[in-house]
Image (tube, rainbow, N blue to C red):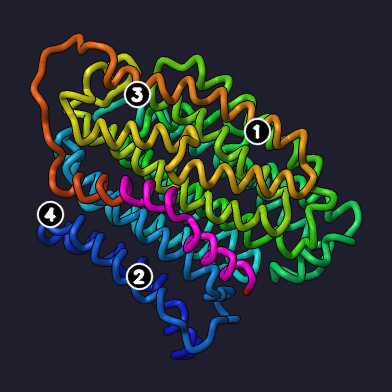
């Protein structure tokens, strides 16, 4: 390893070393500086990633800090910093403390950065498992609630099966192509015969779990319901963004969706229909948003089928869904007191009792439903436009119809916030400064990227072209 290699991977080193520093400070001065150090580490990693490294490749480490990797690393660091802001006061209200939380968030962000910058399948697998192991811990972090431990156990068991599928798929691709380098292996697999196709099948089965594509989505509602709300905010934004980045890292080398069109078609169709139909019947707000995420990832699968325009739409939607997920779950976390919010009916009248959080949650619902002028509308428009241009007309029509049906359950949240009286008396409560900073930032982003989406589209076009 050379000095140039260290310089290249410095954003990742900042994240992983920052995780260790947070734990050390927790042993020396517990409960005081964990969140602040974590946010500073995320900011440092993001600022370093904005620089162009002296060499983009670190071959001995299996990473490449291309513009693509640096873009996603900045996004992951930003989502981690906002998730830490959300969790600081929420943890105090619910009796959760300790530096283990920010340290694990930083380690998970390190895993996301490794996924986005991987140059070979081995590094990709290690990064994927690093971020997944971090979420196993985070989901089960609320030791005061049995549901949190149950969700963590379910996530661990399903994740172990998923990891086996991914590892076996990579092994078969290596056997068919003779290389672990992502570009060469994927390009060679297009003519690799039955072994390569079997490898792709296993790899897609494992990755469908990571991104919550039906029928590998069954863990999602339980984990979203049982996990601490700030953790779910980070899971919905950062983890899904990392999975989308993985697909965008691999699929362009295939030279067209080719033999993967049929499985992608099935995954997109099932996810859009099952996700939206299941969400229509959910009384639990977090389970409803979990099934919603299944549908949202179905739209991303549709984009990934649609060629170059679809890749740009998927990259845009990774950021868009990250912002929307942070806003929705962040508002719920800020509204929660000593007990988590469970039912949609519990939101009755909270738009008046929690005015700031109510506006953020309502805006997030409008964005997730794809109502202009929010970023959700711009993202869905780009996805369906790319699908129609690529000739995926039946699936695009199904996506448009299911997106229209989803408006019902998103607006049901808004109706409960503002149009149904509260069943419990109570006074209004403003968010804490940390929560206000996070929620204000993501709300402005939802509106700004919806009104002026051009700069972000230009940026993702640039990073995907290199």
Image depth: mark 1 or mark 4 in front: 1
Q: Earlier in the sequence, mark 3 or mark 1?
A: 1
Q: Which of marks 2 and 4 is nearer the N terminus?
A: 4
Q: Residue 399 shows which numbered tag?
A: 1
Numbered range of the magenta stretch = 442-465
Residue displayed at 36% across by 66% down:
16
Camera-nearest residue between 202 and 258 = 258
Q: Name the residue under label 3.
A: 414
Disc 4 and disc 3: Cα gap in Å?
A: 40 Å
Disc 1 and disc 4: Cα gap in Å?
A: 49 Å
- Above or below residue 87? Residue 351 is above
Q: Are marks 1 and 4 in contact (CB under 8 Å)?
A: no
Tell me, yes or no, whether the highlighted magenta stretch contains residue 262.
no
Q: Residue 214: where, in percent of width, then height?
A: 64, 32
Q: Name the residue under label 4.
A: 30
- Above or below residue 308? Residue 228 is above
Q: Are marks 4 and 3 in contact (CB under 8 Å)?
A: no
Q: Residue 438: where, in percent of width, then height?
A: 25, 49
Residue displayed at 36% across by 44% down:
326
Q: Residue 45 shows which numbered tag?
A: 2
User: Which SS class for mark 3?
Assistant: helix
Disc 3 and disc 1: Cα gap in Å?
A: 23 Å
Q: Residue 356: where, in percent of width, then height?
A: 20, 36
Q: Residue 107 shows which numbered tag?
A: none
Q: Earlier in the sequence, mark 3 or mark 2?
A: 2
Main secondary structure type of the part rendered in magenta = helix
Camera-nearest residue between 117 and 150 = 117
| In-image side of 47 versus 376 (left or right) | left
């Amino acid at each position: 390893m050379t000095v140039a290699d260290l310089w290249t991977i410095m954003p990742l080193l900042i994240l992983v070393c920052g995780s260790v520093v947070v734990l050390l400070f927790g042993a020396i001065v517990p409960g005081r500086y964990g969140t602040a150090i974590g946010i500073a580490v995320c900011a440092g990693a993001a600022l370093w990633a904005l620089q162009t490294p002296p060499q983009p490749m670190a071959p001995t480490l299996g990473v490449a800090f291309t513009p693509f990797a640096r873009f996603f690393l900045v996004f992951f660091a930003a989502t981690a910093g906002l998730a830490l802001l959300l969790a600081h006061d929420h943890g105090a209200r619910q009796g959760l403390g300790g530096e283990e939380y920010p340290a694990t968030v930083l380690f998970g962000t390190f895993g996301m950065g490794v996924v986005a910058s991987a140059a070979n399948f081995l590094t990709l697998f290690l990064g994927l498992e690093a971020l997944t192991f971090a979420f196993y811990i985070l989901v089960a972090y609320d030791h005061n609630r049995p549901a949190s431990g149950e969700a963590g156990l379910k996530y661990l068991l399903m994740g172990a099966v998923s990891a086996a599928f991914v590892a076996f798929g990579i092994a078969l691709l290596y056997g068919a192509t003779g290389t672990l380098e992502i570009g060469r292996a994927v390009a060679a697999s297009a003519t690799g015969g039955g072994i390569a196709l079997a490898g792709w099948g296993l790899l897609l089965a494992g990755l469908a779990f990571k991104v919550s594509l039906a029928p590998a989505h069954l863990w999602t509602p339980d984990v979203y319901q049982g996990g601490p709300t700030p953790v779910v905010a980070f899971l919905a934004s950062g983890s899904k963004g990392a999975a989308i980045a993985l697909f965008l890292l691999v699929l362009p080398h295939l030279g067209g969706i080719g033999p993967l069109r049929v499985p992608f078609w099935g995954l997109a169709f099932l996810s859009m229909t099952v996700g939206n139909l299941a969400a229509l019947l959910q009384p639990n707000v977090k389970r409803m948003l979990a099934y919603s995420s299944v549908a949202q990832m179905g739209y991303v699968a549709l984009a990934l089928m649609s060629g170059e325009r679809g890749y740009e739409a998927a990259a845009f939607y990774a950021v868009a869904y990250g912002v929307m997920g942070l806003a929705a779950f962040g508002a719920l976390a800020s509204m929660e007191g000593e007990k988590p919010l469970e039912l949609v009916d519990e939101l009755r009248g909270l738009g008046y009792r929690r005015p700031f959080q109510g506006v953020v949650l309502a805006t997030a619902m409008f964005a997730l439903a794809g109502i202009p002028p929010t970023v959700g509308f711009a993202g869905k428009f780009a996805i369906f436009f790319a699908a129609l241009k690529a000739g995926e007309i039946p699936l695009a029509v199904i996506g448009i119809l299911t997106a229209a049906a989803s408006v019902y359950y998103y607006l049901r949240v808004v109706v409960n916030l503002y149009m149904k009286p509260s069943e419990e008396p109570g006074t209004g409560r403003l968010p804490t400064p940390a929560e206000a900073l996070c929620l204000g930032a993501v709300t402005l982003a939802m509106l700004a990227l919806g009104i002026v989406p051009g700069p972000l589209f230009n940026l993702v076009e640039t990073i995907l072209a290199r």
